[in-house]
Image (cartoon, grey):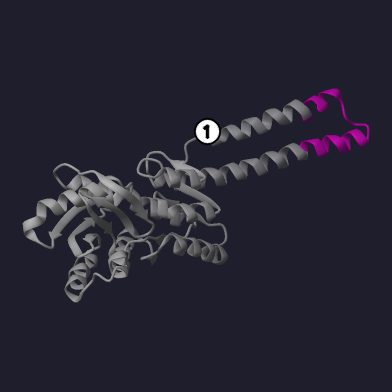
Amino acid sequence: PKLVAFVPSNPSTEAQTKRWAKSLASRSDHPVSHSIVAGLDGAVAEVDAFQALLGRGVEGVVEGKRMVLGNHRLIKERQQSDARLEAELSGHEAQGRTVTLLADETGVLGIFAVADTIKASSIEAVARLQKLGVVPVMLTGDNVATAQAVGREAGIAEVRGGLLPEDKLAAIKELRERHGATAMTGDGINDAPALAQADIGFAMGGAGTDTAMEAADVVIMNDDLGRIAETIGLSRRTHAVLMQNITLALGIKAVFFVLAVFGSATMWMAVFADMGASLLVVGNGLRLLRKHND
């Protein structure tokens, strides 16, 4: 994500607004906050009484003023939105941007618009998952318009935006009932409950939070979504080889048992049924080391 627009409510206090927003954002581990910090110049001020507002943003006291840096939902809940602000936010959201607002007790102080650029590798990863028979679904706390724009670009048909952590949790339960085994990929605190609820959770190790990584079953250290398709493909091949090895080992021993019952078995047959079967299953398992293109 990259900060692409900043609109202060009062141009005369633009420098202050930037400093306050950057100070709050610097205490957050959300990717949008990282983008705001990277996109604003200047130093940061000390933040007291800092706390995360799950699914909404962050709150803290900066230079003696209590402020929040959060999403559209938070501002609505604080009843600090009006028709003019809604129109301006709609314009950004229609372009697929994620909007974050800085506000204090008096009202909104500034608007920060962050644009997500879809990596070509991510679009390819979605296509690979679909080729494997996996149904991709996007669950995000971003507004619906932004989520749908990103989903279209990524090739994801089912997109659900404006979700809180509990909404993502409910969605995982619903998808499991509809499709069966369900995996979840996420990187933030808001994703942790859904990551833990899913049959298998994938966390992003590079940009992900510690909470998300602790809740997940698999951590993707290079943040490459293509690794999910690789993991699924490898798991399926491993399962197939495992079943082949079990069938092969039991089959050889069953044949030797029948020969032994009828008195036709020899010592060399016994050696083959034991050590020979072990070598065969090991050799078959080594096929997994070969590179596959899923």
Pointer 1: what residue?
A: 289
Displayed quadrant of residue 287: top right
**What is the crowding at mark 1: few (fewer than 14 residues within 10 Å), some, or many (at least 20)?**
few
**Residue 1 showing in the rendered view:** no
Name the kind of residue labelled 1 in the image: Leu
Query: Looking at the image, which is closer to me, 208 or 265?
Result: 208
Query: Looking at the image, which is closer to me, 279 or 128?
Result: 128
Residue 160 magenta-highlighted: no
Residue numbers of the magenta segment? 252-273
Residue positioned 23% across, 68% down in the render: 94
Count of numbered circles on the image:
1
Question: Where does residue 158 sit, x and y in percent of width and height?
Answer: 41, 66
Left-right relation of 180 to 228: right
Query: Looking at the image, which is closer to me, 144 or 61?
Result: 61
Left-right relation of 87 to 190: left
Residue positioned 48% across, 57% down in the render: 134
Question: Where does residue 73 sit, x and y in percent of width and height?
Answer: 32, 66
Displayed quadrant of residue 180: bottom right
Residue 257 magenta-highlighted: yes
* Residue sitting at the far left: 12
* SS at circle 1: helix
Query: Looking at the image, which is closer to me, 120 or 30?
Result: 30
Question: Where does residue 89 sit, x and y in percent of width and height?
Answer: 21, 67
Q: In the image, is residue 147 above or below residue 185? A: below
Residue positioned 29% across, 52% down in the render: 60
Left-right relation of 57 to 103: right
